[in-house]
């Protein structure tokens, strides 16, 4: 298998395998499903890739040296200002036809408020949303959201 | 917003927005959830991007001029040799932090066997799998699979 590096970026690289397969190498990612008193923790943020504001589970990339569990705790802290006891739920490849990105979903069992570190690179707003409303909006096609959020909402659907 | 095209390929292109955001433009995709007599229609195929064989729902890209519904019918025919009555379930962005790919999941209500067109570009094997076994393997972390497959399995989980 001959691989040719076409582009090396900050968060991804693009390689051509056998001059045929266009493959995006990307860090693995984590997302956190956190429910408190019937409200789901979602974050709102503008996503340049789709030119839209999304509502998603807190999520982010696993940095070098970090475990998936550590990355999930860090992202939950940075994006929402909570620490938590986390349980790993499941993993999937976001789109294995062209990228190696693998996403692992965690469930937050207990949430502990913490002071949120400032990260000027991320402009996210916390939006606690009733679980029922989030599921309804998703199934009605009203929610611009990510694959781990879809999976998290469907995970919650089984408990209705 | 200044956009610079870094690479134009066959199935994707890479752009830099404001010399900062690395964005992969990708066709939208569809996947089909088909269950018959307690068996889930999965396809096994080697995925160069992750150097692994996956078990996934039949899936593929929406070609120019096609609706999502038409693409789902075509992929089901090409990958598994079935036509079907399809119902749209929901959509999500596979990974909106870096790509605009949006995936729509369809549920097959009635399946009609058809002769499968030959497509030498796709080497997929149909694997009818008991729904319970597919869900178990997914939740146990034993299934290398895609985000629409994860979503489809979780959709089925609610009916157990």
Image (cartoon, coloured by chain):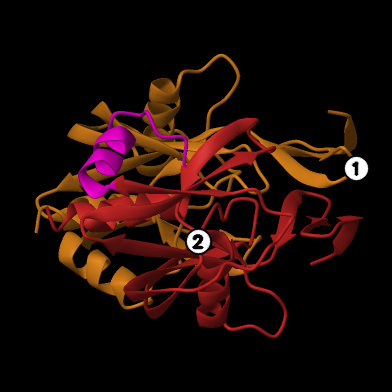
Chain colours: A orange, B red
On the image, the x and y values in percent for residue B94 come to: 53, 55
On the image, the x and y values in percent for residue B150 come to: 38, 48
How many callouts does the rendering have? Answer: 2
User: Which contiguous range is marked in magenta?
Assistant: B130-146
Residue at screen point 57% across, 56% down: B96
Task: Work out whether residue A120 or residue B23 is closer to the camera in this orientation and state it.
Answer: B23
Dot 2 lies on which element? helix
Dot 1 lies on which element? loop
B143 horizontally vs B25: left or right: left
Where is B97 relative to B114, above or below?
A: above
Q: Based on the displayed image, in which of its 4 quarters is residue B90 positioned?
A: bottom left
Residue A71 shows up from this direction: yes
Subunit that carries the residue with mark 2: B
Q: Quadrant of the C terminus of chain A?
A: bottom left
Q: Is residue A61 magenta?
A: no
On the image, the x and y values in percent for residue A8 come to: 84, 35
Residue at screen point 27% across, 62% down: B36
Q: Quadrant of the N terminus of chain A?
A: top right
Name the residue carrying label 2: B80
Task: Work out whether residue A151 or residue B51 is closer to the camera in this orientation and state it.
Answer: B51
Task: Work out whether residue B120 or residue A69 is closer to the camera in this orientation and state it.
Answer: B120
Where is B80 relative to B22, above or below?
A: below
A138 horizontally vs B50: left or right: left
For mark 1, does the 10 Å Cα neighbourhood hold few (<14), some (14 to 19), or many (20 or more) residues? few
User: Are dots 1 and 2 on a single chain?
Assistant: no
On the image, the x and y values in percent for residue B37 come to: 21, 60
Subunit that carries the residue with mark 1: A
B132 horizontally vs B147: left or right: left
Q: Is residue B132 magenta?
A: yes
Q: Based on the displayed image, in which of its 4 quarters is residue A144 positioned?
A: bottom left
Name the residue carrying label 1: A19
């Amino acid at each position: 298998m001959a691989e040719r590096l076409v582009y090396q970026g900050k968060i991804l690289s693009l390689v051509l395998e056998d001059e045929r397969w266009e493959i995006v190498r990307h860090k693995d990612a984590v997302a956190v499903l956190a429910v408190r008193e019937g409200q789901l923790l979602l974050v709102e943020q503008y996503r340049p890739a789709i030119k839209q504001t999304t509502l998603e589970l807190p999520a982010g990339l696993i940095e070098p040296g970090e475990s998936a569990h550590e990355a999930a705790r860090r992202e939950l802290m940075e994006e929402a200002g909570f620490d938590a006891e986390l349980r790993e739920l499941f993993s999937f490849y976001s789109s294995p036809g062209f990228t190696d990105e693998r996403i692992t979903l965690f469930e937050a069992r207990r949430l502990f408020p913490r002071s949120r570190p400032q990260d000027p690179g991320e402009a996210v707003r916390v939006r606690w949303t009733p679980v029922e409303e989030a599921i309804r909006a998703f199934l009605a096609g009203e929610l611009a959201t990510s694959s781990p959020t879809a999976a998290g909402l469907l995970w919650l659907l089984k408990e209705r």
